[in-house]
Amino acid sequence: MRREESYALHALLLLAEEPGLGAAEIAKKLKAPPAFLAKVLSKLAKAGLVESRMGRAGGVWLRLPLEEISLLKVMESLSGPVALDLCATLGRCPTEERRGFCYLKPTLVRMNQEIRKAFSSLTLKDLLPEAPQRA
């Protein structure tokens, strides 16, 4: 998992517990560089996972229920498709181009499917010991 994805997951879990925190407050609580975390929150907002509200009751809020936010959704909103190896995502990998077949590709495709399945089946709700109620 990349640093950006890790900060995103930690921020989302923090927002599940403390909805409405400001971006600077989230960065402080996570000991994250504020500019970097602002970029992460922006990507999460663009993906529809969080929203920022202005004004006195402003802050950052989750847009979806915890059980609808999978690790896969978070990771892909920041980094694009999750893939173990580029070979498995190509129509024909370099070895197939050269030799006409690849012994490695079927294994990588199967592993990619398993990894994606694991990440998609784990949600924020699963990561919290007791899921708080959404506001």
Image: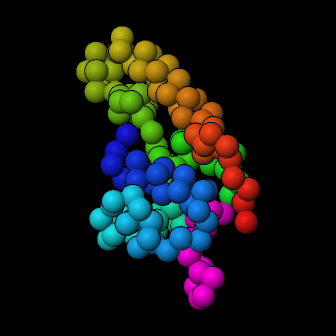
Tell me what residue is drawn at x 62 percent, y 33 percent. 121
Q: Which colour scheme is used?
A: rainbow
Q: Position of residue 18 (x, y in %)?
A: 59, 62
Considering depth in this image, is 124 or 95 the residue closer to the camera?
Answer: 124
Q: Does the magenta stretch include residue 52?
A: yes
User: As displayed, is residue 26 above or below residue 130?
Assistant: below
User: As displayed, is residue 68 above or below residue 41?
Assistant: above
Tell me what residue is drawn at x 39 percent, y 30 percent. 84
User: As displayed, is residue 123 above or below residue 94?
Assistant: below
Describe residue 123's horizontal placement relative to residue 134 as left or right.
left
Q: Where is residue 14 in the image (x, y as percent from the top left)?
A: 53, 57
Describe residue 87's horizontal placement relative to residue 70 as left or right.
left
Is residue 123 among the parts visible in the rendering?
A: no
Q: Position of residue 116 (x, y in %)?
A: 53, 32
User: As displayed, is residue 30 above or below residue 87?
Assistant: below
Q: Is residue 73 magenta?
A: no
Which part of the image, by quadrant, shows the N terminus? Answer: top left
Q: What residue range appears in magenta?
A: 48-63
Q: Where is residue 48 in the image (x, y as percent from the top left)?
A: 60, 63
Is residue 13 among the parts visible in the rendering?
A: yes
Which part of the image, by quadrant, shows the C terminus? Answer: bottom right
Tell me what residue is drawn at x 40 percent, y 69 percent. 38
The furthest residue to the bottom: 55
Tell me what residue is drawn at x 39 percent, y 58 percent. 30
Considering depth in this image, is 57 or 4 the residue closer to the camera?
Answer: 57
The furthest residue to the top: 103
Q: Quadrant of residue 16?
A: bottom right
Query: Tag count in the figure?
Result: 0
Q: In which quarter of the image is residue 83?
A: top left
